[in-house]
Image (cartoon, rainbow, N blue to C red):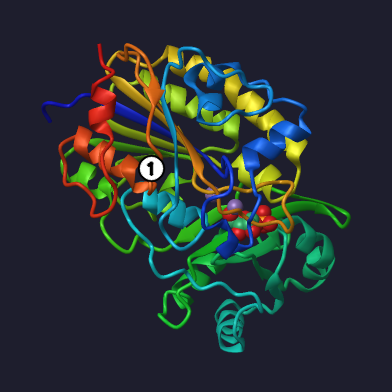
Amino acid sequence: MKNETFKRVHLIVLDSVGIGEAPDAHLYGDEGADTLGHIAREMKGLHMPNMAKLGLSNIRPIEGVPVADEPLAMYGKMQEASVGKDTMTGHWEIMGLNIDKPFKVYPNGFSEELIAELEQRTGRKVIGNKPASGTAIIDELGEEHMKTGALIVYTSADPVLQIAAHEDIIPIDEQYRICEIAREITLAPEYLVGRIIARPFVGTPGNFTRTANRHDYALKPFERTVMNELQDADYDVIAIGKISDIFNEEGITESVRTVSNMDGVDKLIDVMKKDFHGLSFVNLVDFDALFGHRRDPIGYGKALEEFDARLDEIMSVLREDDLLIITADHGNDPTHAGTDHTREFVPLLAYSPSFESGGEMPVNETFSDIGATIADNFNVKLPQFGESFLPLLKERVK
Ligand SMILES: O=P(O)(O)O[C@H]1O[C@H](CO)[C@@H](O)[C@H]1O
Ligand SMILES: [Mn+2]
Ligand SMILES: [Mn+2]
């Protein structure tokens, strides 16, 4: 634990906040996707003064966000190298992995064998079994589920098997047990589903709402990540929000649950006020779950502004030798066709109070450059993928 430039790194992933189509967007049907750009257009300008000061519009002009004359942060964008645009792929890549074989997806639902095994082991029938939007499928099948106790199983364009159930029909603990069974079944190589997700809801037909009891059961990352290296070197790795689910608890020394973006910011600030040594890593998922997939650009825009309004608070608790990194894991343009993620560049803003000034960074060819930078900073084993931009940051330190 010596020669660190930054004693603590705080990494914020704004889930799905892409900054324009990636060069390979056509391979994903995502030409023209631009999450931030299109939201700003729909909002007739985004009010994000704090992100503006860091240099958000210096990356690329965003309507309503002024280009900073003297950006505080090192700013740039990153391309995703892995073959996928889901949350696990994005986050694992950030921490140094390259997913070169795409996770399986299920455009026609899950196989009869899988469903039969799930029904047999849970003692419940399965309904649905198709790709769907989570709010639409509970509207469609929620009533039948309430009458019969059958499990609503659905997927999306992501490698996920989601199980929706009403909390009064199947108590939450039983829902979690059912998902654990589904997780066990789908660890088999012939299935290897990326994530099982419990999607509990409440309410009455026509008025169902999902609850914050969502729980994700991911796979263990295929290889060691920078977080494992940090943990083994006795650093703190504090996961806030969905991070511990996404990494299946791997390489995490403390995990803090959250119920919303603003709760995530509160918990991050609590963590930042404590003495720790290492990494805090937060995912703010509402952008994606509540607005991106729901194709709600105005709701998304307001959530961005709400985050920005808390950013000065986050910056005010930064210590001199802290590094703040703000980025995203994929896009989810709410004006794009369908309801799925979009293959985009993600923004990269890196700021420390110790900087003399910010400046432009070359485009990062992989999200793993972040993992490499963190590993480099803490002198632990560098990931196989990614190139550290720590030297660029060091040049800025007073
Ligand atoms: O439509 P809902 O249920 O929100 O599902 C969304 O949430 C899943 C997990 O992030 C994604 O696969 C996406 O389809
Ligand atoms: Mn995501
Ligand atoms: Mn998503």
Q: Residue furthest bottom?
A: 113
Q: Nearer the viewer, residue 29 or 158?
A: 29
Residue at horizontal 62%, vertical 65%? 157
Relative to 278, is 134 above or below? Answer: below
Residue tagged by mark 1? Answer: 364
Residue 270: give x, y in percent of width and height: 43, 23
Residue 267: give x, y in percent of width and height: 48, 28
Q: Nearer the viewer, residue 389 or 262?
A: 389
Task: State which quarter of the image contains the N terminus.
Answer: top left
Residue 118: give x, y in percent of width and height: 57, 79
Q: Is residue 95 visible?
A: yes
Q: Quadrant of residue 391?
A: top left
Direction from residue 11 to residue 23 in the image, left or right: right
Disc 1: CA contacts within 10 A as few (<14), some (14-19) or many (>=20) = many
Relative to 371, is 246 above or below? Answer: below
Task: State which quarter of the image contains the C terminus.
Answer: top left
Q: Is residue 199 visible?
A: no
